[in-house]
Amino acid sequence: MTDQIEEAERDAGDVAGEADFISAERLIFFSDAVVAIAITLLAFALPIPHGLPAGAQNTTVWDAIWANRADYLAFLISFVVIGGHWRSHHRVFRYVTRLDSRIITLNMAWLLMIIVIPLATRLLSGSGGFGVRFSLYAAIQVFTVLIFLLISRHIRSGGLLRPGAPSPTASGDAALLTIAALFAVSIPVAFVTPWAFALWVASAPVARAVRRRATRAEQGESADDQGS
């Protein structure tokens, strides 16, 4: 009788574990789909030169394309930005096998920011009021990164990972904070100079440098703990 009860408990645990895993997979697939839609919306918004005369020369076509260079540049920026957000999401969620209401809410908030990026991209490529347009885009990135930082920390502390899986590290949190800080600093700079874009470009290499430094510090602390 006892063996039957234990077997039933194991079966129930297996079913619950499988249900948790399926729920996590559904959230990941849904998030991937939303990110793909956001990138697709970026492409749909790209302008195509119209009204060219029949038999237009190559230079005429090129001039028409060049006139929309701001839109194409904004597209490339947003493609890289969304791709970076997705890579971070993939890296953190690949070992998640259980969800709770908090992680679902945070993930939905993160997806909201992702799906708004195409709108911010169209505003960024507009004319006039550069500081406002730039700041709106940068603010969305700050919120996206900070929400993802909360996701990373909750995954680490909420026991949502597969047993034995590597958890998000403090060095990753430091890199995220660095990116958010550089985007935030770019907002007041944009009201002074359009070179505020340089802070966006610098965010990736600076974040990598911060991550490496934080990782070395973590490894040093671990070695000290083992030595003691």
Image (cartoon, rainbow, N blue to C red):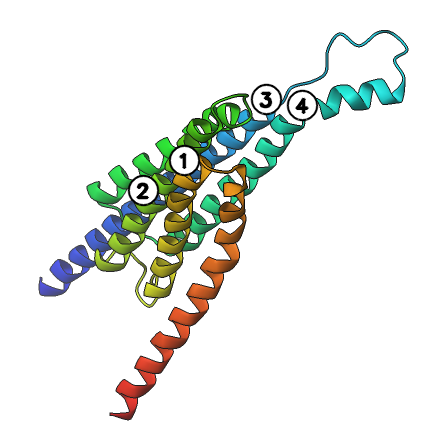
Residue 145 visible (yes or no): yes
Crowd rating for badge 2 (residues with CA inside 10 Å; few <14, some 14–19, many 20+): some
Q: What is the spatial separation of the Cα atoms under label 4 and label 3, in whole angstroms?
A: 14 Å
Mark 3 → mark 2, Cα distance in angstroms: 31 Å
Q: Quadrant of residue 54?
A: top right
* Contact, mark 4 vs mark 2 (Cβ under 8 Å): no
| Residue 68 in picture, x, y percent from top left | 67, 23
Contact, mark 3 vs mark 1 (Cβ under 8 Å): no
Which residue was labeled with disc 1? 30
Discs 4/1, front: 4
Q: Please state the horizontal and vertical placement of residue 4, each as a whole percent of the image.
A: 14, 60
Asked if 163 appears above or below 137 in the picture, the reply is below
Image point (50%, 38%), residue name = 193
Q: Which residue is mark 2?
A: 23
Pick whichever of labels 3 and 2 is earlier in the sequence: 2
Residue lying at 36% horizontally and 76% vertically, measured from the top left: 217
The one of 40 and 99 positioned closer to us in this rendering:
40
The reply to whether callout 4 and callout 3 are in contact (CB within 8 Å) is: no
Q: Amino acid at mark 3?
A: Phe
Q: Does residue 166 appear in the picture of this structure? A: no
